[in-house]
Amino acid sequence: MSVQSSSLNFFNKIRPKTAQAASAPQGANVSNPIKSDCVYEKGSLLPYNLANVVQIRTQLESEDEMKMYSDIISALAQNPQYSTSPQDGVSVPKKMEALLKSGKLLSSSSNDNSTTLKNLHDILTTPRTLGFDNIKILAQTVDAIYNPTVITQNFGDIPQDVKAQILNLDGIAPDIKANPSLIDVEGSGTCVAASVEFHMANKHPAEFTRWISGLTSQNQEVEQKVRLDALSKNKLDAITFLELFETKQKKFDFNNTVLSLKPDDGAYIRAQVQDKHWDKGERTIVDILMQSTLMQLGSQESYDSLTDIRGGKFSSNPQGLVETEKTFIESIVENNEKLSIRYQKVDDNQNLVGWECGFDKIQKHIIDTLNTGEDVIVGYVLTNETSGKTKEAGYQNTPDNSPNKIINGHEITIVGYKTDKDGNVTFICNDTDDDESKFVEFSADFLVPKIHHAAYPVCIIEDDLALIEKQQAA
C-alpha cells in the first residue's frame, strides 16, 4: 500500500444514506453466536459476552454493594431534575435496575477490576472537577451504559455571549482570538474516538465508568495499566510505540506500563459550555471528556477540543485520526494487541483501485470477531461513484471527479449480524453521527466493499494478514 493511502482520515463528513439502511431495535440480540477458540489474554479485558459466561452477577451480595446501590437510588430520587433522563424520558433508577438485571452493573471487566457499581458510586460521592454536579455526571454515565447509542460526536453550538467569555480566557490561542469562528465546529472529526467510546460503554461498562470517574475527578485523569505485549509481541517495538505516541508514563517495567490519560484543556471549556447549554442530540460532558482523551492518545497529545484540530506526526490532515492511531487506541483501551487490515488498494491520487482479499474473507473476519462477543470498528470510504456523483447523475468525469476517487471516510461500529434464509448477511451497526439513538442495518453486500480498514484480535486475522503482506511484498 502507498504511504498516501494510509493517510486517509476518517471523520464525519459522510455516512451511508441508502434504501439498504434500516433501523434495528436498540439492544437487540442479533448475532449468530458460534463457539470460538479466539479469547483474549489472561489479565486483560474480556469481551463482555465472554466475561458474563464466567462471572455474570445480577444480585447485590455484600453490604457494601447494597449500600452503594441504595446511595445512588436515594440521591437520584432526591433530585427530580436528574431522576428522569433528558435523553429518553426513562427513569434513571429504572435504568439502574435494568443494568443490575443484565449483569452490567456488577461487571468487573475493567483495568483495575473495579465494578461498574463501584465506579458509579465514586462519581456520586467524591468531588467532581470544576464544580460539575455529581448527580448530573452520574445520570449521563448511566444513560450511556444503558443505551450506548446515545453517544454522539455532535459538538453543539456555543451561545454568542459564552463565546465572548471564552475568547477572554487566559491561554486561548492567538489564532482563535483572531478568528473566533474556529470554535464553531459543525462537522467534528471525532468519529474514531466516539466509536471507541461507544464500544467501551457497550461492551465494557465497568471500564467506561472507571474512565468517567477519573476524567471528571479533581485529578482530571485516568490511569491505564497496559501490558507491553498488548502493543506488540516484541517488547522493544512496544516501547517504541509508546515513545512515538508521546504517552505520559507514570510507571514502567519491562512487562507493563501505567499511562496517565487526560483530555486537553479545551475539553473542559467545552464541557462547561455543555453543562449549561446542552441540547438533546449534542455531546454530553461525558462524551466530550472521553472523546478528547482518546483523540489526545491517538494524536500524540496534539488535539485541541476548541477547534477540533489535531497535529502530530502520523497525519498531515488536521482533522480525525488515521488507521495507525485508531489501532493504537484500541490496543491501549482493550489491553490486548489489535491488528489492523487495510483491505482496499488506493493509488497515489486517492483512487480506489482494488482490494487485498475477497469480500467473503472480509465478511468472515467481521463475523468471527462478533462471535467472540466483541464489536468491530470499521473505517469505510465513499467514492464519487458510490456517493452518487456519477456521469449518469450529471457529474462531469475529470481527474478530481473520477468515479473511483475517494472523497471521504467515516468510522462506524458493527455490533452484530443476522442471516436470512438465503444466507444473505445483514450487519447491525452504530453510527455516532447519524442523529439517531438506535442501531441501523446495512446489508453486507452494501457495506463490505466500502470498508477500507478494521482492527481485530490477533488470533482472528494473523494468518490472513501475513499472507496479504507476503503478496504485497512479492
Image (spheres, rainbow, N blue to C red):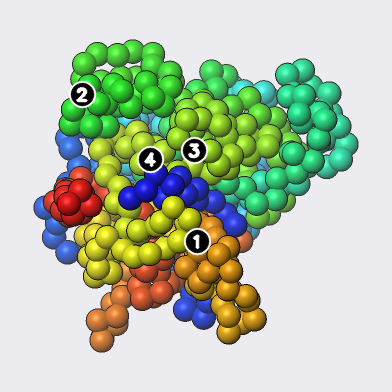
Looking at the image, is mark 3 or mark 2 nearer the viewer? 3
Alpha carbon distance from label 3 to label 2: 25 Å
Vertical side of 442 occupied by 156: above or below: above
Can residue 72 be seen? Answer: no
Q: Secondary structure at mark 4?
A: helix
Figure check: 395 above or below 162:
below
Q: Are marks 4 and 1 in contact (CB under 8 Å)?
A: no
User: x, y percentage for residue 295?
Assistant: 51, 36
Q: Which residue is at 63% across, 76% downward? A: 395
Question: Does residue 417 show up?
Answer: yes
- What secondary structure is found at the residue carrying circle 2? helix
Looking at the image, is mark 3 or mark 4 earlier in the sequence? Answer: 3
Kindly identify the residue that appears in the image at 82 percent across and 30 percent down: 178
Residue 387 numbered tag: none
- Circle on res. 324: 4
**Mark positioned earlier in the residue sequence (4 or 1):** 4
Q: Which residue is under mark 2?
A: 235
Q: Amino acid at mark 1?
A: Ile
Q: Which residue is mark 3?
A: 315
The residue singled out by tag 1 in the image is: 406
Classify 152 as above or below 131.
below
